Image: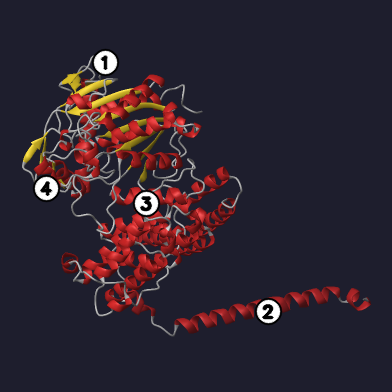
Amino acid sequence: MEFYRKHRKFIKISGIIISATGVGWIITQINKTYRTLNSVLDTSVIHFMEPMKHVDHKQKVDDNFVLINWIKTYDNNEQAAKKGWNSLKFAYARRLLNMTNSENSAVRRRAVKQLAEIKNLDNWHYSLLAHILDARTAVGLARTEDVDPRFFIQPPYRYLSYNHEMIINSMKEFLIALNNRSKHSCMTYFINRAFFDQDAERLLDNESVSTELRRLIQSANDILPLCLESLLHHSTVKDYAKDIVLLNGLSLLMEIHNRFKNNPDINIILCNILSNISMYPELLENIYRTGWIGVLAEWVKESDIRISAPAARTLANLDSDDEFDAVYPQRMYVLHPMLRSDQNTNVDVVFVHGLLGGVFFTWRQRDRNETTIGFLGKKKGNETITAADANLKFMRSSDPAVREYIEGLQTQQQLEWDQLGQDFEFVLNDVPVNTNENATGPYTCPGNHQCVKQETKDSFSYTQCWPKDWLPEDCRYLRVIGVNYDTSLSMWAPICPAEQTKTTLEERSNEFLEKLLKAGVGQRSIIWVTHSMGGLLVKNILCKASESNSQELKNLCSNTKAIVFYSTPHIGSRLANLSQPTALVLWPSVEIQELREESPGLLQIHNKFLNVTNSYPIKIVSFVETKSTLVTAMKFNLLLVDPRSANPTVGEFFEIPQDHLGICKPANRQSFLYQKVLNLIKEFAEDPCTIKK
């Protein structure tokens, strides 16, 4: 310490000198290294190879460089942000899945709805969610609009290595095992004739072989659809649909679906088989694990109602959180809403077809081609593309810019027409040529009416079922149900010779009474829309309900607000009054025999029905044809239902210039046949006093 005090100045000077010397040495070494590196390459070569640097060019290069680097940085940031956002959505989806296990049905429904709204997750997210969610949640998602199909598990591939012949052999073995477990005469008949070969001893007794059937199934391509038809028929008998699942038939049917995805006929049969299986909710887990829920979610959005309606029925039956808490048995179809809906429902509109009809035929938009009746009750008509169809095809296939221009032009024309149309009234199509004194309109509509605005849309699109496509657009608070049953003019050529069921009007009424109650009909206001013999069925159903001691059945009468009859033969039809020689040729069916003019049974039903209308305030609207219907095989025109028989002597009555098959098929929404029914339904469905808050 003493030494430092004595030599402090010397020490400071020495430190400064040493530091300065060190810094100088470092700088010298850096300069030396820089010169050495520069001497390795002649930089003049680089300058020689570079283009001349102008100010504008240099600025452009610099701008591009900055832009490219910014894009790369943005992409990286966007990908990172998207990844983080998807992770958050996935975590949210996991939370919603936990909520789907709530004991509260309303909470489960809301969670499923929000889960379906989650979009654009990674594939592995959807795959994991699909394997986590349970069957009940999967059904709810399948009944939710615009759900991502990746939410549903893929089916197992058990028959991937099988060729077509092996699939047919598997179906053969399955049908034999199914018939051994739940024997039925129709299945026995089919197996005996379809698989009569060298293995006959393995099959059932084979005594006589149908030459026509064997010729039909000679090729492998023909036998598989026939097997499915037989299986469909078997699934309608008793509880035999359960056995299809218990024998692992769903996996085989899934393999058939995968190989015939683009075959609508195969899909229709498969969908109806599943629809019958859906009557047993305890089989839901089997249906889910075999991948059918995802397929049904696609089918329910099909434009072909023959596929979408059975699919909607299947999912509704499997949905334990359905707002209607209803079961739709065989022959009952929910046409609206086909998916889950939060809208209140005030009215059930029930459509019941008549002779030769069906949910998928009777309620179509009217064809421009003439429709006729075949000898065995089949509809005849040329399926040709209409001008509207051609225009629709053009609109769909045109250049996007052209299509946008056309749509804009149509919108402008519509706006101009709305202003002009206020001063005009249009006469509706299909206006009556005669009415009774109780009849009221509407017979016209203003030029700016909604149906006029929809004319272009209706001309560019064709509906297979106007109750499904038109009514929900034009009227709220509805549930639309279609009742389906088989009828024929003749008893020739039955589907299965071993089973010739004779179903009477009384038997059908008892059958549908039970099925309507299962579907929840009677719990709210009812409007019946019927065609031909369907009107007789509804009348008999209401008569039985009014005479019943069951309050549940009586509700069918007390809640019936209106009935629409399209050409219903209240006192019989001329078609049934066949001469003896003609009757021997036609071999009239049970339905035809019951429709004889002045039939005591029909008169009794009608008298009871008039008593029902006196006891309950039911509005009646009746339409009848004035044109004859062509029966092709016999080459004659026949007025199937005349005004005298179609007039129930109560309510409004209209004579319409259409034939028996066309009277329930409006050409568009400007038809009186549609507008009259629509106004009637609106009167009850949109009544402010009945709308639930």
Label 4 close to label 2 by CB (< 8 Å): no
> How far is the residue under mark 4 from the one under mark 3?
40 Å
C-alpha separation, residue under disc 4 versus residue under disc 1: 43 Å
| Mark nearer the N terminus (3 vs 1) | 3
Report the amino acid beneath label 4.
Answer: Val
Q: Which mark is residue 21?
A: 2
Circle nearer the viewer, 4 or 1: 4
Image marks 4 and 1: residues in contact by CB distance under 8 Å: no
Q: Earlier in the sequence, mark 4 or mark 1?
A: 1
**Foreground: 195 or 483?**
195
Q: Earlier in the sequence, mark 2 or mark 3?
A: 2
Which label sits on residue 583? Answer: none
Few, some or many residues within 10 Å of mark 1 (<14, 14–19, 20+): few
Q: Residues within 10 Å of mark 3 (few under 14, many from 20)?
A: many
* Residue ID for mark 1: 438
Q: CA distance from mark 4 to mark 2?
A: 130 Å
Q: CA distance from mark 2 to mark 3?
A: 93 Å
Mark 2 or mark 1, which has the lower sequence index?
Answer: 2
Real-space CA distance between mark 2 and mark 1, rounded to the nearest whole angstrom: 123 Å
Give the percent coordinates (x, y) of residue 56. Answer: 32, 58
Above or below: residue 42 compared with residue 516: below
- Position of residue 681 measured from the top left corner of the image (x, y, whole percent): 35, 27
- Say which amino acid is labelled 3: Ala
Residue where numbered disc 3 is placed: 311
The circle drawn on residue 585 is 4
Q: Report which quarter residue 22 is drawn in.
A: bottom right
Residue type marked 2 = Thr
